[in-house]
Image: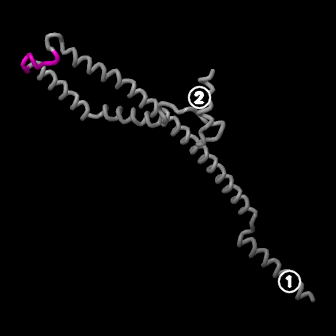
Amino acid sequence: MARANNRTARTEARLDSPRGLRQPARIFQSNDRFGRFTEAIARGMGTPWFLFGLSIFVVLWMLYNTLAPEGIRFDSAEIGFTALTLILSLQASYAAPLILLAQNRQDDRDRVQIEQDRQRAERNLNDTEYLAREVVALRLAMQDLASKDFIRAELRSLLEELDKESKAD
């Protein structure tokens, strides 16, 4: 109990965040930093240069442990290069989860991008529908307006009526 109170007192003593948001320090301060690290590893392992370098490493290992004098060899060809097998297995056991973590981050980014694209498409559709309604409203308003020929005809008829009235007087 005293240990929990001590931990609470340490987190409450922090002044760099509001009271309700204070949390004890974590081992990894940012999951994003670790995620970028895994993506860099996955990106590096996916290059032809990595495969070429790994192939050269394996060939040199096998050549050294086959052709070097027996006293300075550190891995035996007779038992199937056990140390090389262990090193490659260790590399593979770390590579697979790092690649999966990088793929998960990419999937998350793709999901966010798809959602943003969907929202943008929805806004564009709403804007297009609004503009179409506005164009229709303008066309209807233009039909209600008097045309130039109609105004001329009306003015001529008014002028004729005025002429008739002036002649009648």
State the residue position of label 1: 162
Which one is earlier in the sequence, the residue at label 2 or at label 1? Answer: 2
Q: Report which quarter residue 167 is drawn in.
A: bottom right
Q: In which quarter of the image is residue 115?
A: top right
Residue 146 image position (x, y, % from top left): 75, 68
Residue at the top extreme?
79
Residue 15 forms part of the magenta stretch: no
| Element type at mark 2 | helix
Residue at image point 16% right, 18% down: 74
Q: Residue 90: x and y, percent?
A: 31, 20
Between 28 and 16, the one nearer to me in the picture: 16
- The residue closer to the viewer here, 58 or 156, is 58
Magenta segment, which residues? 67-75
Tell whether 106 sits left or right of 131. Answer: left
Q: Pinpoint residue 2: horizontal percent, then vertical percent.
A: 62, 23
In this picture, residue 110 sits left or right of residue 21 = left
**Which residue lies at the image location 8% right of the left edge and 16% below the top edge?**
70
Residue wearing tag 2: 7
**70 within the magenta span:** yes
Which quadrant would the C terminus be assigned to in this image? bottom right
